[in-house]
Image (cartoon, grey):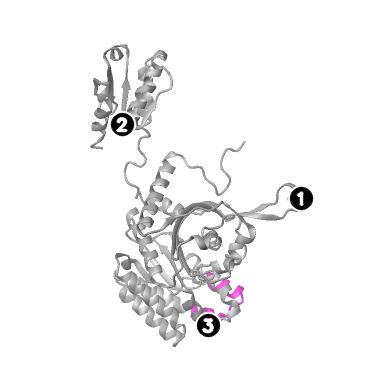
């Protein structure tokens, strides 16, 4: 029998879980400092909740759940696994709007599922780390989201990263200027979203396949290529580069899309006033394939990585699909799996995460002493130590060897002589030194020895 997990799914051993918990802990701590509150939603949603929210490409990747019981024979689906955390958030806001604050700020860290083709850094089950703000059209929302994402990356040790910024309104203006008919805007955006992954030639071929006029596609790709070249020559401080891109866009759009350009200018100014501003770059080629975005869009890029570490944008119409009223919303999602892969490959995790499972192991002298050994373990745990109890009365050498294989630094021994005198032998497996101490002092002695490490 094949004991491996299903393709695109993974098991997480203790070392993996510790690393994941570390990253999730940093993310949650940063978001809480910005006033975001935790939220959780079910893994399974009604299928109509998800369909039609992600565009043509996204809908194909939804994991559908067939009807059960009497409806099983129909082969139809009525439920689906959660595709992302944004649409469930929109449903929650529509359902509990009266109970939520006027400006609802939430973060959510939960798994999602996509029927995608597995590859390096891309899985069928993976965690998303979302942060969203509901209820305001102010560009302060975008600025805080980008700043929070930047703070997370800085805390995790990323120094070379780029926050790519664009606006769906600007993209629509560029498509118009390129002669792309409005009915083909959606197809063009799906193709353009792959520009940094498959290159200009492949995107041009896909645009042609989707019916986008060749001359319009050529003009678009030339403009994006010029901006990309300018970005490669830009100095470390992106302020001048961003101003140059805004000037190019204003000239190309010839007085159109003024609201979108104004919003971009505001975001650049607001984020530029924070340390995160050093990582912000306007990128007119950024498309973001999901169809629900209505305004600003952004992605997080790091050198030598195909794809992004996260992305998001403004989706002012999505909640209205459930509620009937327009509710402004904006968010960003961090790709936990890719962050973990990159941090592992680049040795970015702090020391100690993969260390011992316990601080001390209590040995078993003989079976008659087993109740006392468990009592000693309880005493040590009450003093804040992590304690493992060896479960069998085997030779001490074998027990010591097991503790060493688990990287447990200390063992305790309570033989007949120690028990009679109320003592505990504490052995340091690293140095080989051991000492007899009063039982009441054992925890203090071990903690003091651990303190420098």
Disc sitting over residue 383 in the figure? 2
Name which quarter of the figure residue 34 lies in.
bottom left
Closer to viewer: mark 1 or mark 3? 1
In magenta, the rendered stretch is 202-221
Name which quarter of the figure residue 396 lies in.
top left
| Distance (Cα) linking label 1 and label 3 | 49 Å
Closer to viewer: mark 3 or mark 2? 2
Q: Is residue 265 visible?
A: yes
* Crowd class of label 3 (few under 14; some 14 to 19; many from 20; radius 10 Å): some
Count of residue discs:
3
Taking 67 as reference, is 250 above or below it? below
Our reading of the magenta stretch's main secondary structure is helix
Q: Residue at x 49, y 81 (%)?
A: 173
Disc sitting over residue 73 in the figure? 1
Where is residue 254? Give x, y as percent.
Answer: 44, 87
Where is residue 410? Give x, y as percent.
Answer: 30, 27
Say if the magenta span includes residue 409: no
Q: Is residue 448 left or right of residue 333?
A: left
Q: Earlier in the sequence, mark 3 or mark 2?
A: 3
- Quadrant of the image for the N terminus? top right
Q: Which residue is mark 3?
A: 176
Closer to viewer: mark 2 or mark 1? 2
């Amino acid at each position: 029998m094949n004991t491996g997990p299903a393709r695109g799914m993974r098991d997480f051993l203790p070392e993996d879980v510790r690393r994941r918990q570390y990253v999730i802990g940093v993310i949650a701590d940063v978001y809480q400092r910005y006033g975001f509150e935790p939220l959780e939603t079910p893994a399974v949603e009604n299928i109509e909740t998800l369909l039609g929210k992600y565009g043509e490409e996204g809908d194909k990747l939804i994991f559908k759940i067939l009807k059960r019981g009497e409806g099983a024979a129909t082969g139809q689906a009525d439920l689906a696994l959660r595709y992302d955390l944004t649409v469930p958030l929109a449903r929650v806001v529509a359902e509990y709007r009266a109970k939520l604050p006027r400006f609802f700020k939430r973060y959510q860290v939960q798994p999602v599922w996509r029927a995608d083709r597995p590859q390096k850094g891309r899985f069928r089950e993976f965690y998303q780390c979302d942060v969203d703000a509901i209820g305001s059209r102010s560009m302060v929302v975008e600025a805080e989201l980008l700043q929070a994402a930047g703070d997370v990356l800085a805390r995790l040790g990323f120094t070379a990263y780029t926050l790519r910024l664009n606006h769906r309104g600007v993209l629509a203006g560029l498509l118009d200027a390129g002669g792309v008919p409005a009915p083909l805007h959606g197809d063009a955006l799906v193709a353009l979203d792959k520009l940094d992954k498959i290159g200009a030639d492949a995107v041009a071929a896909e645009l042609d396949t989707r019916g986008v006029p060749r001359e319009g596609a050529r003009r678009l790709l030339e403009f994006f290529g010029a901006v990309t070249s300018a970005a490669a020559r830009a100095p470390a401080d992106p302020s001048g580069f961003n101003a140059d891109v805004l000037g190019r866009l204003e000239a190309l759009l010839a007085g159109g899309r003024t609201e979108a350009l104004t919003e971009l200018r505001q975001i650049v100014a607001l984020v530029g006033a924070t340390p995160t501003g050093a990582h912000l770059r306007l990128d007119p080629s950024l498309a973001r394939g999901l169809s629900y975005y209505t305004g600003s869009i952004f992605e997080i890029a790091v050198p030598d990585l195909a794809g992004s570490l996260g992305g998001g944008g403004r989706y002012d119409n999505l909640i209205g699909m459930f509620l009937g009223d327009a509710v402004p919303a904006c968010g960003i999602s961090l790709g936990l799996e890719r962050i973990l892969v990159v941090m592992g490959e680049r040795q970015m995790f702090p020391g100690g995460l993969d260390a011992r499972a316990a601080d001390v192991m209590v040995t078993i002298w003989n079976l008659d002493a087993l109740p006392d050994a468990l009592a000693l373990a309880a005493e040590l745990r009450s003093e804040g130590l992590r304690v493992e109890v060896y479960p069998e009365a085997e030779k001490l050498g074998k027990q010591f060897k097991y503790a060493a294989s688990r990287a447990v630094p200390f063992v305790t021994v309570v033989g007949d002589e120690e028990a009679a005198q109320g003592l505990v032998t504490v052995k340091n497996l690293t140095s080989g030194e051991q000492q007899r101490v009063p039982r009441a002092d054992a925890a203090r002695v071990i903690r003091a020895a651990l303190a420098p490490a």
